[in-house]
Image (cartoon, helix red, strand yellow):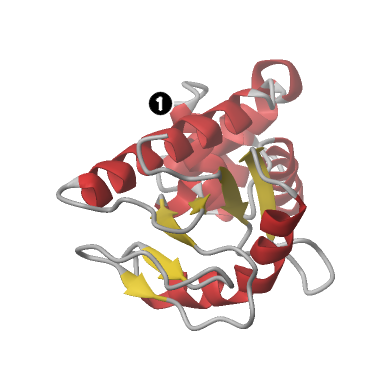
Amino acid sequence: MILGADGYVVCRVNRFASSNSQRITVVLSSVDRQMRKTLATIGPAIEAHMEWSLLPFTWQGEEGAAASGPFVEELSVGDTSVAGVGFPVKLGIMGNGFALFFGSGLDLVGDRVVEFHRDTYRIMRELLTLDVQRISPHQNLNDRELQCLQLAADGHKSEAIAEELALSVHTVNAYLGFAATKLDAVNRIQAIAKAIRLGLIG
């Protein structure tokens, strides 16, 4: 309402998706069919933009020019029916995403761009935290997986963990792999970060 937008969408970007899986996932939305079509059209341009910039961006629609404001770049995209503005978010190991607001004549005066970008970071951080909490790791991770994660977090390599716990290196790697899978992490580093954030290890 403050921007004068007709709709919004908050999306998560999966950097590690394979070529045949969905890289952009809609998390929150109030969009209609035209806006969904616009998202599909500009998605690749948004991903390319996020590779080298965290600046908010705008794009043109059929009804007129893109919105303008301070600290905003205009995306060069194909034909889109609805104009709008987007705010990219990069939260490191926690994840990446963006929020889009659709409409012509969006009001980006004064500090509004900076305020909305800050709010987008807060919202995305909360959404990604909820995703992590849904995993219910207390019920899923067993003691050995937690021990291996803790030792890995302390800087021990698989060989040292195996010696400490009287296990084979293969078994240690299996435990760390199971823990990463249960925490929906792409590798042991991300699994350790999520386990620390959830208070499972110190």
Residue 95 position (above or below residue 18): above
What's the residue at 35%, 36% (across, down)? 2
Residue 9 position (above or below residue 140): below
Q: Quadrant of the N terminus?
A: top left
Can I make out residue 160 in this image? no
Count of numbered tags: 1
Q: Report the amino acid beneath label 1.
A: Gly
- Residue closest to the eye, 1 or 112: 1
Looking at this view, name the residue that lies furthest to the top.
139
What's the residue at 40%, 26% (across, down)? 202
Image coords of residue 175 (percent x, y):
72, 41
Does 15 sit left or right of 174 as displayed?
left
- Residue closest to the eye, 15 or 107: 107
Looking at this view, name the residue that lies furthest to the front.
63
- Residue closest to the eye, 97 or 167: 97
Looking at this view, name the residue that lies furthest to the right.
20
Does 143 sit left or right of 159 as displayed?
right
Image coords of residue 20 (percent x, y):
84, 71
Image coords of residue 6 (percent x, y):
55, 44
Label 1 Cα crowd, 10 Å radius (few <14 / some 14-19 / many 20+): few
For label 1, the residue is 202
Can I make out residue 164 in this image? yes
Residue 59 position (above or below residue 119): below
What's the residue at 51%, 54% (across, down)? 103
What's the residue at 41%, 50% (across, down)? 91
Image coords of residue 115 (percent x, y):
24, 42
Dot 1 lies on which element? loop
Quarter holding residue 3: top left
